[in-house]
Amino acid sequence: KDSLGALGSRIGLRIGNAVNDDKLTTDATYTAILAGQFTTVTAENAMKWEVVEPSRGVNDFAAADRLVTFAAAHRQLVRGHTLLWHNQIPGWLTSGVTDGSISRSELRTILKRHVTTEVTHFKGKIWQWDVANEFFTDSTPSTINPNDFWVANLGEGIIADVFRWARAADPRALLFYNDYNIAGEDGTNAKADAVHAWAKGLKRQGVPIDGIGDQGHLDTQYPFPTTMTANLRRYEAAGFKVAITEADVRTFVDNATDQNPTDALALMAQPYEFSQMLKACLAVRACISFTVWGVNDRDSWIPGFFTDPLQGYATLHDVHLQPKPAFTTLQQDLTLA
Ligand code: G3I
């Protein structure tokens, strides 16, 4: 059977995964899956600010560079992730803001330097940048979160500025806004409506935003969001490229080591929801990549985060790195596409 990546390439769709840098250098099975099945890669953590500037003014791109080199060797395109987010900001930065030693104007200067330095470092090597990540509230109606670290300190306009700085540093990279529950996954469509209206407005003002990334973190305890295709089409109609950037489908499991689903129906729901999500992307011409968040269940972020009750079983390969029904289902879907 052809790989997911090869099957996707026949129809112009890149199939990707998120990479854990440690595994890339230590786990041959992991690396073989990544190289063999996928045509685009995202650094799960290695391009985030706390990693690339661990102490002020000292950049460390070693892990991210290894990934970019790996990708080039395997003809994979790289999604850069992520320039502006409230999470995984360096400790020296947050403590400086808290204790007042970094003023707001200085914070803006530091941010501009960070964005420019990182985008310039990878210039010409990044296909899509997740420029800004997770700015909208989960409430109805949804708005830009006024309590977000960046918004609280520098105002909403900082998001547009970061898109402009990124464009200036690498004019050829596609610049994305990335978020979760923005294609109706929350069952209300409130966040989808808000992001759509906001992104359309920015574009009208000439802000260089090329795409909308829907993370695609699903959970089998909720029905598949049937509005996903319509929401992706609405972004497309507003002139955006679209990507599924962090697909996984979690479910309740018995323990973190084995990750056996506790509900037998989840064994069907998990591949079903993956399949429906891929089909939503396949139904939209502007959808250019479908990226899974984690090469296997062992290395997925889910069991470490959803601990009570424990969830897992969220990716395409199990804890022993064997392909699961979800893998075979996506392979079949791509074969028929
Ligand atoms: O690097 C340290 C290590 O030195 C330390 O020993 C260890 C002990 O816990 O922690 C390590 O840091 C962890 C880091 O991943 C690297 O492995 C953090 O604790 C852990 O919180 C962090 O989790 C990441 C999470 O983002 C944090 O924001 C996940 O791997 C990553 O999958 C997840 O990815 C995010 C996307 O960027 C944005 N969308 C949501 C998605 C899931 O949260």
Image (tube, rainbow, N blue to C red):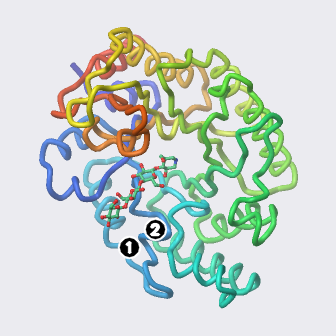
The image shows residue 245 at horizontal and vertical percentages of 51, 40
* Front residue (pair 31, 5): 31
Question: In this view, which residue lies farthest toward the front?
Answer: 308
Q: Are marks 1 and 2 in contact (CB under 8 Å)?
A: yes
Please identify the quarter of the rendering in which residue 212 is found: top right
* Amino acid at the residue labelled 2: Phe
* Front residue (pair 182, 138): 138
Per the image, the residue denoted by label 1 is 61
The image shows residue 262 at horizontal and vertical percentages of 32, 18
Identify the secondary structure beneath mark 1.
Answer: loop
Q: Which mark is first along the chain, 2 or 1? A: 1
Per the image, the residue denoted by label 2 is 122
In three-dimensional space, the C-alpha distance between marks 1 and 2, rounded to whole angstroms, equals 9 Å
Q: Residue at x 70, y 39 (%)?
A: 138
Q: Residue at x 82, y 56 (%)?
A: 206
Please identify the quarter of the rendering in which residue 240 is found: top right
